[in-house]
Amino acid sequence: MFGYNGKVLRVNLSNRSIIKEDLNLELAQKYIGARGLGVKTYMDEVAPTIDPLSEENKFIIATGALTAAPMPTSGRYMVITKSPLTGTIAISNSGGQWGTKLKNAGYDMMILEGKADSPVYINIEDEKVEILDANQYWGMLSEEITNKLTEVHKGSRVLCIGPAGEKLSPIAAVMNDVDRAAGRGGVGAVLGSKNLKAIVVKGSSKVNVANVELAKKVNEEKINILKNDPVAGGGLPTYGTAVLVNIINENGVHPVRNFQEAYTDKADLISGETMTETTLVRKNACYRCPIACGRWVKLKSGKECGGPEYETLWSFGSDCDVYDLDAINEANMLCNEYGLDTISAGATIATAMELYQRGYIKDEEIEADGLSLNWGDANSMVEWTRKMGKREGFGDKLAQGSYRLCESYNATEYAMTVKKQELPAYDPRGIQGHGITYAVNNRGGCHIKGYMINPEILGVPEKLDKLALEGKPAYAKLFHDLTAVIDSMGICVFTTFGLGLPDYVDMYNSVCGDIYNAETLLEAGDRIWTLEKIFNLRAGIDKSDDTLPKRLLEEEIPNGPTKGHVHRLDVLLPEYYSVRGWDENGIPTEETLIKLGLEEYIGKILSENK
């Protein structure tokens, strides 16, 4: 068996059973691995109407076909469950080193079931798997528990939740290697609901490669392409994803004050260039990554830790009208420590600031916290982040995310969310293709599962007019499908800055055997995306949820280079459904299901719709 290990680890926390099962290789190859295989497995085992925080829900951690293989950026893994934030499928990705250790321990996938009657953690050392008491670790922050567990289990890597996950915040992340996160969708709360604090793993095996010499050649070739690409080999290694701050702002699509504006003359204060000159200590690369976009920074206190990504600089920065890099670094550190999604956390504070601005939140509600919700209050922004992690005071309300916060004031029009998940750092009114990827995204507001910023802003693989409508739905579908492929392989999506579909075919086939060509590999991505859509439809997520906040559809951008624009979802959504082979209600047709090998769902797509 090449690429895949052939083993699935099933752990039931209720009865403490540990079972090792054979991988269904045919299914794994059909869905590639990681995201695709995880979603298929989850759908086969869990009812889509399940309560995400119930004992009956399951939590899948899946490595890709190329995770830990000798290929660039092969350190990714996926978390698959039902999101407590959105009610959709949760597909959350993380890098670092942890995922490779799970693969090296011999497992392609881990299925967590049930609920422990008290806090536990799981220790994996190759064949040895044990469920151990975690009462002494409950309540610990990410860095502390990682240090404690690696003292006990030498040479291991740690995945954990922080207090936010323990306290079931629907914006809680799963952390690994201290500062890497499977961040979106509230997946940390699902582990918290199961009383699972951490998974410690150490592995000694290597991935079997189908053609060692060819794989070596392919690896060297793809690394060379990435290193010579101006983005993957230039901007990202030099400035990290923060290189985007000035670029996105200069294009007039950098949201300010909860998307009330889309341009600021202060952006450079929190840019990658400024970070490099002031707080950057070093790069912080994931496994086998030639790009090394991760940052390691120094806080004002002198502590050194993982630095913020572009989206984090935006959510705690421009979105809150804060341009204090030290404060943003601090908030980012707190999110890593407490286990919070930085996009949702910062965007929720920004939403609260607008609710306060408009008189919905009153002074007396936050008086006891001793903090303000004034735009630009950097100190309060940091302390609200801490209170969210602790679920303390008004921070408890913030920890529910921005949609539920707005809902409590009957003011959901101020929640900049899709399917209740906070939108990231790009205003879709000025990037039409990227906007459609927001609206139809299977996991709610998300930029990374269909990164149309590549062609519309960065000109990769070609430059598209960001305001044009023609052809954008087909392009968005292509990016959705290709990203599903990359996620399922266990590779980083940032490789798309230099690599294209034929490169991924080369990488997969050299490791796993001659299985895919360009057409069939992209079709596998289509299959995975459509399968996720089917889950959502069966969970009661329908066409009415494939939309954008009213502000982005009706209020023109008031300032900057894209002044005067709104998003034209009315034009783009029907065309997107059409190019996907879905009907006018966004439901895959029988013909499409047959074409994608999803015949088993014919007549069953809406059978469990609420």
Image: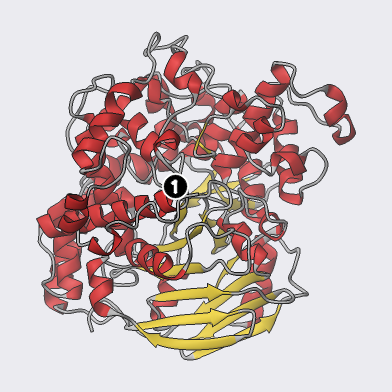
65 in relation to 94, above or below = below
Residue 376 percent across, percent down from the top left: 67, 23
Q: Is residue 230 visible?
A: no
Residue for badge 1: 443
289 in relation to 562, above or below = below
At label 1, counting other C-alpha atoms closer than 10 Å, the crowd grade (few under 14, some 14-19, many 20 or more) is: many
Frontmost residue, 83 versus 219: 83
Residue drawn at (71%, 58%) of the image: 163
- Furthest toward the bottom, the residue is 127
Residue drawn at (39%, 34%) of the image: 439
Q: Quadrant of residue 560?
A: top left
Residue drawn at (62%, 41%) of the image: 345
Residue 111 percent across, percent down from the top left: 48, 74
Q: Is residue 90 visible?
A: yes
Q: Quadrant of residue 57?
A: bottom right
What amino acid is labelled 1 in the image? Arg
Q: Which part of the image, by quadrant, shows the N terminus?
A: bottom left
Residue 433 percent across, percent down from the top left: 29, 29
154 in relation to 517, above or below = below
Q: Position of 378 compared to 235: left or right?
A: right
Residue 371 percent across, percent down from the top left: 81, 31
The color scheme shown is secondary structure
Secondary structure beneath dot 1 equals loop
Q: Position of 166 compared to 577: left or right?
A: right
Frontmost residue, 466 versus 246: 466
